[in-house]
Amino acid sequence: MRILLKYAVLLAVILASVSCARVAVKQPVPSDKPMVRLAAAQYPQFSDDASIESLKEAVNRNLKYLSALKEDHLFHYGDDTYTPREIKASLLYFMSVLHTCKGDVQMLNKSMREDFTVYAASGSDGLGKVYYTGYYVPVLDGSRTKTGRYRYPLYSLPKDLFSVDADSGKSVGRRVEGKVVPYYTHEEIHKGALAGRGLEFLWVDNRVDLFFLQVQGSGTVRLEDGSMINVTYAGANGRSYKPAGRVLVDENKIPLSEMSLKAIKRYLSDHPEDVDRVLFSNPSYVFFRESRESAIGSTGVSLIDGRAIATDKKVFPQGALVYVSTNKSEFREDESLIGQSQLTRFALNQDTGGAIIGPGRADFFWGRGSAAELQAGYMKYNGTLYFIVKKRK
């Protein structure tokens, strides 16, 4: 089962203004296709700012996904199509190149130009501009039973919820007196619409954190004995997602330039009287299930921190090797924002999300923990996105 999360990370839809990274793809003309094949002279200068070991593990997990596909499954890269066998062979060859290069950037780029075909995402402007946001795996404190401290439930998927499409998990409602009506809203569920059905399987102590667990679509609940329970997306109530942060911007509670996940949490902590109104402005509600692993992507494999992205699966091939070029945030020790620096990294396209739509959007998976949450909460940068396949002989 996939995360299907991200009604993105929330900044994907909260903010309209973004900081700029390098976004110009050297294409001869604008493209109206999702991606365009580049000539070798148009390739970016490839480099990687993270541990190659993490990339190896991400590739190994991705190979399991590819191995499970039927051979008639086709991957569409612009005007070209590839089989699962070709994509697997391409990944294996790429990893052999990394092993041979041993960190030599010049050797790597020589091989990329000689041995690989590179496609650029056409982006939102047809010229390669891709808007990046980030997501992460939150960790909440919780209990198997309701107590005075742990009183906010995680619900499993209700049996009376009808789904429009089993693959997308898009739900349409419930049946009342022979008629299908919209499913309960976030506010109705919070106020007890599902109480007494035995759907509660975990309880947590922080309502705002639970809200953002739903935004992320998966996470981990830490029990009092120290054990960790992974939870992942099981479905949603079919209501349209509306970013809670938008309310605070529109009401001038938080300036647009200062908007971040951290800023929203701080505001709600300081203004508990506004929590109901702000959170209920989003009628969407997510249901969960327990999972052996955390951060299960739409390809069905557990994601590696900093080595996965989410894109529109109707536009870009799942399981593809990609190259990300954008920015990341830099922070002081007190977690205040200093500025930004370049992020250049190979990753796998292993996830999707309801707010990640079209060729100009990508969501970068930062991983687990507070540092990942901090990066994801501030990520709102333009960049470029490339898809890589070994050349055919």
Image (tube, helix red, strand yellow):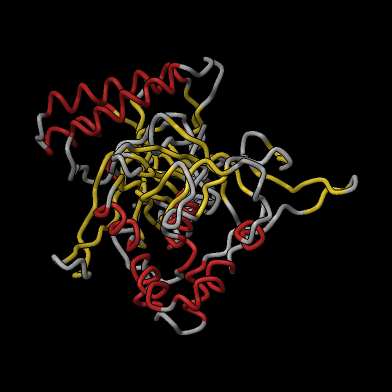
Q: How many marks?
A: 0
Residue 123 visible in this rendered orientation of the protein: no
Looking at this rendering, what residue extends furthest in the front direction? Answer: 148
Q: Position of residue 124 (x, y in %)?
A: 48, 57
Asked if residue 212 is positioned above or below residue 93 in the image, the reply reads below
Residue drawn 46% across and 60% down? 207
Q: Quadrant of the C terminus?
A: top left
The front one of 262 and 225 is 225
Asked if residue 36 is positioned above or below residue 186 in the image, the reply reads above
The front one of 249 and 314 is 249
The front one of 392 and 3 is 3
Answer with the quarter of the image where residue 132 lies. Answer: bottom left
Q: Position of residue 100 (x, y in %)?
A: 13, 23
In the image, taking residue 292 as reference, residue 75 lies left or right, namely: right
Q: Position of residue 355 (x, y in %)?
A: 53, 54
Asked if residue 71 is positioned above or below residue 155 in the image, the reply reads above
Residue 46 visible in this rendered orientation of the protein: yes
In the image, taking residue 24 as reference, residue 108 lies left or right, namely: left
Answer with the quarter of the image where residue 12 lies. Answer: bottom left
Asked if residue 85 is positioned above or below residue 27 in the image, the reply reads above
Looking at this rendering, what residue extends furthest in the bottom direction? Answer: 252
The front one of 199 and 92 is 199
Q: Position of residue 54 (x, y in %)?
A: 22, 34
Residue drawn 35% across and 46% down? 365
In the image, taking residue 74 as reference, residue 368 lies left or right, namely: left
In the image, taking residue 60 as reference, residue 253 lies left or right, namely: right
Residue drawn 42% across and 73% down? 268
